[in-house]
Image (tube, rainbow, N blue to C red):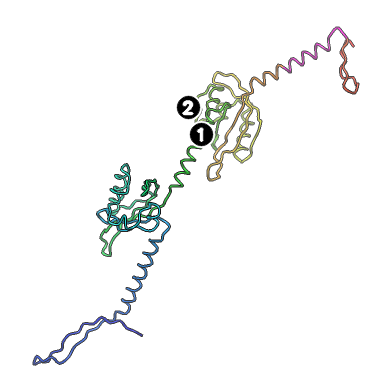
Amino acid sequence: RPVEVLLNATPRIDSSGKLVGVVGVGQDITEKKQAEVELTRVAADLRKLIDTANAPIFGIDTKGRVNEWNQKAAEITKRTKDEVMGHDLVAEFISADFRDSVRRVLDNALNGQETANFEFPLYTKTGERVEVLLNATTRRDANGNVTGVVGVGQDITERKIAEKQSETIANDLIKLIDTANAPIFGIDTEGRVNEWNQKAAEITGFGKDEVMGRDLVAEFITGEFKSSVKAVFDNALLGENTANFEFPLYTKAGRPVEVLLNATPRIDSYGKLVGVVGVGQDITEKKRAEIGLTRMAADLRKLIDTANAPIFGIDTHGHVNEWNQKA
């Protein structure tokens, strides 16, 4: 078995000053050498891991000059390692509007204050914008002295684009709801109003500011309909849709408005039930017309029955289906 030895060799002198040999003082450094080999291997593995990581990783020294630039950083910026090494990262590769904030993050890391989840844009060699989510970590030597900063990033460009698209869709949906030609309202799981569009405000006379956060059933539904309307909302909060439910809303001026309601559970992006959306239809005029038609039909029935002439009717089979008093 090989033994690694660290040797000090010293001449051996006798009492008359004559050189008579050599004295060797050794130290068994087998384990130390093995540890050094292991450290070298770990360092090589770490170097390979950094260079081939699926995240952009860069490093700067205490002067802000690039001293680390892995393959992913080169890929997303289209700048090779040779093109950036030794260059000032902030001054040369960060857009002017973000230089101060990025420099602050890196300076903080150089002072031992690390930063997580800092978003900033990098511009590629061809001028394309790449959104990066950065963790900046202090880099120290074996003695604990700060030697620079290591930045581990994440390319979130696609995520930011998706977020922007989602935001646009959400804004369009909010606008659509607010300007829809039907009353639309929402309540949370406690029954408090959290949505009230322009049409709902128009037909009730209650502005959005007057109803937001208030209990819809308790404050805006008449006594005899409170239980039935609450049951519809409670069912929706259990995931059950209700269609074509009729009930009256009373306006600010005390005038009843007949509403035909569809109540739908409201689900957040995690699939959690967070409230109810109600899409209504003002059927006040329709109800009045129905009442008018019912009254007209009753009047016609009375007119036929009391007419001073015999009136009868038959169906398509010749069976009598009308026979007034005179007949």
Of discs 2 and 1, which sits in the foreground? 1
Q: Position of residue 35 (x, y in %)?
A: 33, 74
Q: From the image, tell me which residue sits under label 1.
A: 172
Where does the image place residue 176, in percent across and percent down from the top left?
A: 53, 31
Instruction: Estimate how packed mark 1 is, as few (under 14), some (14 to 19) or many (20 or more) residues with alpha carbons within 10 Å.
Output: few
Q: Report the magenta residues as a range.
A: 293-309
Name which of mark 2 and mark 1 comes first in the sequence: 1
Prevailing SS of the magenta stretch: helix
Disc 2: CA contacts within 10 A as few (<14), some (14-19) or many (>=20):
few
Rendered position, 172 above or below 258: below
- The foreground one among 143 and 58 is 58
Helix, strand or loop at mark 2? helix
Q: Does the magenta stretch include residue 272?
A: no
At x 34%, y 76%, the residue is 34
* Amino acid type at mark 2: Asp
Q: Which mark is residue 264?
A: none
The N terminus appears in which quarter of the rendering? bottom left
Distance from disc 2 to disc 1, alpha carbons, whole Å, reads: 21 Å
Relative depth, front residue between 266 and 68: 68
Q: Which mark is residue 209?
A: 2
Looking at numbered disc 1 in the image, what kind of residue is underneath it?
Asp
